[in-house]
Image: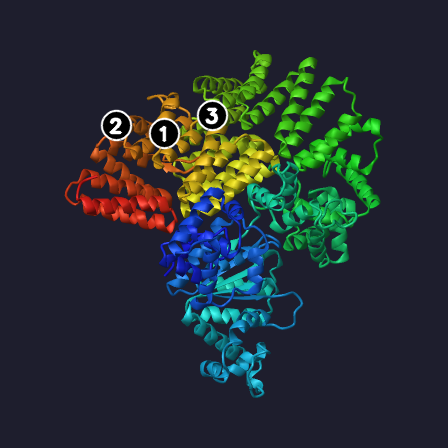
Amino acid sequence: MVDVTLVRINVMGSIPQWLSNQARSRSVTDRELEILGGLLKKQSNAEMAAEMFISVRTVESHVSSLLSKFGEPGRAALIKSLEELAPEQGLTPSMPAPLARQARSNRFLGRVAELQLLREDWRRTLQGSERLSMLSGEAGIGKSRLAAQYAAEVFNTGATVLYGGFHEDISAPYEAVAEAVTPYLRDLSISDLQESLGTLLDDLGLIVPNLKHHRSEPDADRMVDGGVGRHRLTEAVRILLQRLTGTRPVLLVLDDLHWASRPALGLLHRLLVKGELGRIHVLLTYRYAELGSDLSSFISDTYRGLAATRIEMSGLSVTESLALIHSFNKDAEDPPESRWLNVYAETKGNPFFLTEAVRADFGARKSVTGTGSVPLGVAELVSHRVRKLDSGDRALLEAAAVLGNQFDVDCLSRVADCEDHRVISMTERAAAMGLVYDNKEPSSAYVREEPDRCTFAHEIVRKAILSHVSPARRRRIHAAAAAALQDETIGGPNRADEIARHTVEAGVASNPEQVPFLVMAGRSALASGAFQDAYDFFDQARQYGARTDAVSWSEITFQMGVALRGLGRWDDALECWRESLDASSDSGDLHSVARTCEAASYNAMWAIRMEEAVQLAQYGVDLLRGSEGRELGRLFGHLAIAQGWSGDYVRSSRCIAAEHGIATTLGDRALKAHALGASTIQLTAFSEHSRAIQNAKAALRDLRDADDRWMLSSVMGYLQFALVGTGRFEEARALRNEVSTLADRGGNFGALLQKNRIDALLAFYEFGDMQAFALYAESDLELCRAVGTGLEAMSYGYLGTALFYSGDMSSALTHFEEASRLEKRTAMTGWGAGLLFELLAYQGNRTESLKMLDEYRWLMPAGNQANTCGSWFWMLAVAEGLFVLGEHEQAAQLYENIVDFSRRTGVVCMEFVDGRLVERSAGIAALAAERWDEAERHFLSAIDIADRLPHIIEAAHSRRFFGLMLYSRGAPGDIAQGTTYLTEAHEAYERLSMTHHAKICQDAVTERAASGTSF
């Protein structure tokens, strides 16, 4: 049986089973099978190269290999022979049309963890177990698209796929069940059906009206609405499914279960609870915001009675969203502009909202007149939901949309002149429809006590509702809100920024008087994460304000930079802050200087403008030196971060000590937490992960109490990497939701990038899905370019790794060369170079490898001291590369340093790219030195760690090298044991489609068997 948990998702689309069979009989590789799929679709070499992330030259090489394996003289002859073979193989029943359309509709991105859960259920199905999976999420989140992708994958294995969709306001209660089974009834003879179903055929005919047979009129007992009739129908469907599962395994997809009738839910429940259906996987999708009492009962009863898999889907990550946007604009030469980051913020990665917004922008669809920028499809969906509210609730919701993305329940009740309980009831009903959510629900431990507030689920949803409110009504609502918030019982001075925003929007102040209001309105928008609105307010304020007022000008320009940072326009933000810094320096406003230097230095560091980052922080420190206040302390922390990621451990450590000293003198817990947070970020630059984790955990509580969201999200982003590096994968995963929420609210794209990278890396380590990782790498590159992070080198490293492991050496080389070229002199220098060196070694390019080793000799870490994360990685990559080249003496010399690295830092795996285990690297160096006992200990430890994490690629690598070590040592029993480990590694590589690595194992076993000598 096929273990589909390791089946590769082909970028070329569905590969028919008959083609897979033909390929296997001719020893065709997985990559060549994808090429065959492209040839059948009449794709050019360039088109296949683009879809598979490989070079045209590599495609040409694969085509040439296929011509040889199929014995055909040319491309046209090969295609013709394949087309002639198709009917002879007996095609499996066709893929249901709705699923086939969904699978072809647009590019599939992300959802790696969800797919793996479904694949695990399919694996159990193949073993004879009935499985139930439930996909839930809001409208447009991609439930049907994920189901279609999974169904296409299952269909390719030769399974039967059934599909039925429920529809709103359709009277036929069993429509989805009838739709699912009808295609398989049409081709069966009446005698076959009667033999299987007997008199139950009449009952089945009640829900499948086009069933071609002559039946008698059913009596009262057989009517579906009666209890007897329902049970007879259940038995008829059960027998039919048993017949299908007896031939081949079945996937039954029932879509939009939230529209299912009570009788249909009863039928499903009886089928699933009774069981005895055979090899079937039932996949249900539904919207959790539209759960009626019937469906809620069905889910709880069914879940309690069966070991069901429940998957709740959320939006695409920012990197996946940018990749989806880019897929609509393939012909554009430039990367997506930063405006798309604002689209992502408005849609929160909902694929439908995102797609509609992009299509509208590209002119494919027109926006509704007067909606501002709300695409037609989104407007229709939101209007459909809102119409389910009564007129009073609709008016309240529209008023809430005017108040902002977040709205205060007390303020709304004052504005609408109604009782609180009326507003609360509306928010509860709107929340049940997925339109808003309560801010005080679980994940807000970091939020201080504040009035009851709700937030719209998506900014684009709020805009769609707002489109129904006239400008005149909006102004009056804003004026009422400004007046209400001046009441100290719900607002007062603490909400001056919000009062100002509503005052501006109400049009009360004249232009000359508006500047203070505009600045306060901008601050209010920043606090609620409305960065575009904030930018517009500050930009307006600059237009009205007098440039001669340096203090005001500095403040406005600084805040505009904060808004630009939240929009992902980091280069523009830095320019604003430099302008603000000039103005505040001229006026002697040291507070503004400190604040601006802190923000600008940190962003310059993320843009990999390290010299500029150090200079900006140092400038602030020099101006404030002697003040010994909090602002100077924070600047020391940011100077430490800039120096640390520039690779200067000594100076950065002194700056951390300086900030900590000021915090101790002042007795300032918040500043001490900031120092510990800065130390976490600094230590990560040197892979000092054990200390980084300790400092981060000591800092988090006080950072939450201080409401320092930017620093908190930044520290948590680096903490995730440190946890992964020390092998604490689950702890890293546990932080993802809070990091995402904090980073979204603060516009911290650096923390978002880190969170997304951790998600992708952990999925890659656990599942080894090369294509998913390559797709992520492409989207990661888009985000780096859009925001201006300067971290594209790592994106190319990810792409190259996926291609290297897939056996596409030439394309991997191109990406690793680019990764190495883009590396700047920072603490990360060595990651790209290490990947390139190792690949050259595996290619057998001895000359270039050793030349590169000589050029980068300065990068090798020194013993008994802190070294940069890049230099540590370089050492581990060099150890493996030298061993592969046969330079065992040089590799052996690295052993003590590798062991020292592990002891000093607590690092288990190098988390930035491939997650290589330090224990495996130590084993390789010990093997090169023929230190057999140490090598065995390291390899066994690596195998144990890889299996526990899990890290399936490292599990295969560790077994391969341990097998080679046993061959080399040649002690009694070593050869047989070595063959076992190499065989296990070979099987794992084959499942992962790592053909080059699989061949290494096979060659080693074959050579050993032929020679009878040790390694």
Residue 20, percent from left and from top: 42, 59
> What residue type is disc 2 on?
Glu
Q: Nearer the viewer, residue 600 or 809?
A: 809
Quarter residue 121 falls in: bottom left
Q: Is residue 590 visible?
A: yes
> What residue type is disc 3 on?
Gln
> What residue would you read off at disc 3?
682
> What residue would you read off at disc 1?
849
Taking the view exactly as shown, the residue that stands out farthest to the front is: 73
- Report helix, strand or loop for mark 1: helix
> What residue type is disc 1 on?
Ser
User: Where 617 falls versus 272 (above or below)?
Assistant: above
User: Badges 2 and 1: C-beta atoms under 8 Å apart?
Assistant: no
Q: Nearer the viewer, mark 2 or mark 3?
A: 2
Distance, label 2 to label 3, CA atoms, is 35 Å
Q: Nearer the viewer, mark 3 or mark 1?
A: 1
Residue 12, percent from left and from top: 50, 52
Numbered disc total: 3
Left or right: 976, with 674 as reference point: left
The 10 Å Cα crowd at callout 2, few under 14, some 14 to 19, many 20 or more, is some
> What residue would you read off at disc 2?
889
Q: Nearer the viewer, residue 669 or 31?
A: 31
Tell which circle, 2 or 1, labels the residue nearer the N-terminal end. Answer: 1
Which color mode does the image show?
Answer: rainbow
